[in-house]
Amino acid sequence: MTLLGNLIKQGIRIRESLDQDFTPPFELQKTEFRKLIISARNTQFGKAYSFSGILHSLKKHDNNSFYQDFKSQVPVHDYNKMYENWWHKCLEGEKDVTWHGAIKYFALSSGTSGASSKHIPVSLEMVKAIQKTSVRQILSLSRYEGLPSSVFEGGTLMVGGSTDLQDNGNYAEGDLSGITTSRIPFWFQRFYKPGKAISRKKDWEDKLEQMTLKAKDWNITIIAGVPAWITILIEKIIKHYNLNNIHEIWPNFEIYVHGGVAFEPYKKGFQKLLGRDINYIETYLASEGFIAFQANQGVDSMRLVLNNGIFYEFIPFTDKNFDDEGNMVEDPKTLMIDEVEENVEYALLISTCSGAWRYLIGDTIRFVSKADSEIVITGRTKHFLSLCGEHLSVDNMNHALLDVSTEMGFDLKEFTVLGVKHGSLFGHDWYVGTDSASVDETILREKLDNRLKELNDDYRVERIAALKDITVKVLPNNVFIEFMEQNGKVGGQNKFPRVLKGDKQKAWLDYLAEKSIK
């Protein structure tokens, strides 16, 4: 079997795609743009916004004419605008609305900023694009030093939503992970765990139980899933089999693929479940498409996928383009891939092979390498706090809590922050999840406040002025898990919002009141 592993690994090296490594990002994106516009030119959306005319501008000597025409003719969209004007027709069975043909799948996104699930269209072209990018991610493993060939021989455990999709006549709906897993290529099925039967289960506790019982029969080398739920599964397996660590049952476990939420706050606790070091790979797989993945070993950035079904635009994340609540203005400044700068925060607009057009995905990113299109995710357009100009990002929150938890010696599990009125001024209420025996809330509050002041000058200034105080409440991690269960957000791609606003803030406070937590 070692020979088989080596042959597979050599084959991967031979088959690696070099397009993105040796083609300018602008050229890749212009080609992708052309493909998208050609495919959608005869849709209702394409006709309404003169896609045929935009195609003619692609032939002009001025390389940038096509983008100027695209910006001037096609408005920016958030989910509500896209759904109310166009996507609702797809749900009703209409064809050729924003993408050619009928949309057969809709991904349900919990939409951590809003109260209800979003229906994101997923075309067959998008399913294929996601599969293609997943293969590219596997190909990138050939660059990793010290990776044993056995990693290509074992099973890949993918913990996501149920593949038993809800059939609504015109379309089927479910988690994106459930949609894509239900259509995995035949060649991958022998490697895929937990298998079709368990993957179809909708009851999360039952699914966890079945995976735990089967764990002894699997040779798992790669695990993929949201950190919170993968941690719960591994802890359950360790407890069931009375193990010291997960490597006692899966000795060849080498790679953990994570995404959807910053992994750093979970990493220290996760490593305690292991018997040795492993490789970590970050992915950026949203309900709207596979946007980026970590292409090189041991880095903290991901490479945007520039030639596989998505055209990107970048909005500087400033008060000129977004209001205090994170809402996009009507006509924001937008840039193409060749116009961005490193170390500047941008909100993402995407146009995709599922019929999203100039669509605000809701995430904010920062380029760490423009030449290689390497990015890091910094947060969400609405998952930040700026009640009085403090401009506190999720990136700030993650770094501050990680630093402080490391200094104080406790394992951080979950956290969330609420912005509140404090008389005529303002305050931040922090809820920190940990199963560590004792954490002094007063010391945690002081250290957290001081670290945030070091990380964010705006926060430091406002703590002197309008941001009167912060509070910190330490809770057992099961409080966060039970809240998600109570709200039907367990397993798969679900993650706890880092900032709670509006209805979700009220639901959280009501939940704490029911549990007599103050």
Image (spheres, rainbow, N blue to C red):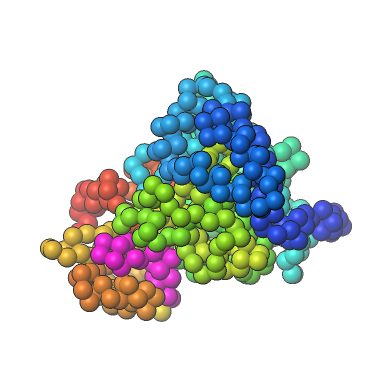
| Outermost residue to the front | 61
Q: Residue 484: image x %, image y %?
A: 37, 47
In the rendered image of this protein, does residue 370 appear above or below residue 32? below
398 drawn magenta: yes
In this rendered view, identify the residue nearer to me: 27 or 99. Answer: 27
Quarter where residue 432 is shown: bottom left
Kindly tell me whether residue 410 is visible in this rendering.
no
296 drawn magenta: no
Q: Residue 33: image x %, image y %?
A: 64, 45
Which residues make up the magenta segment? 385-406
In this rendered view, identify the residue nearer to me: 72 or 256. Answer: 72
Q: Is residue 388 left or right of residue 373?
A: left
Residue pictured at 74% horizontal, 58% vertical: 23
In this rendered view, identify the residue nearer to me: 233 or 403. Answer: 403
Q: Is residue 515 left or right of residue 403?
A: left
Residue pictured at 47% horizontal, 64% vertical: 345
Quadrant (top left/top right/bottom left/bottom right) for the N terminus: bottom right
Q: Residue 246: image x %, image y %?
A: 59, 60
In the rendered image of this protein, does residue 334 appear above or below residue 435? above
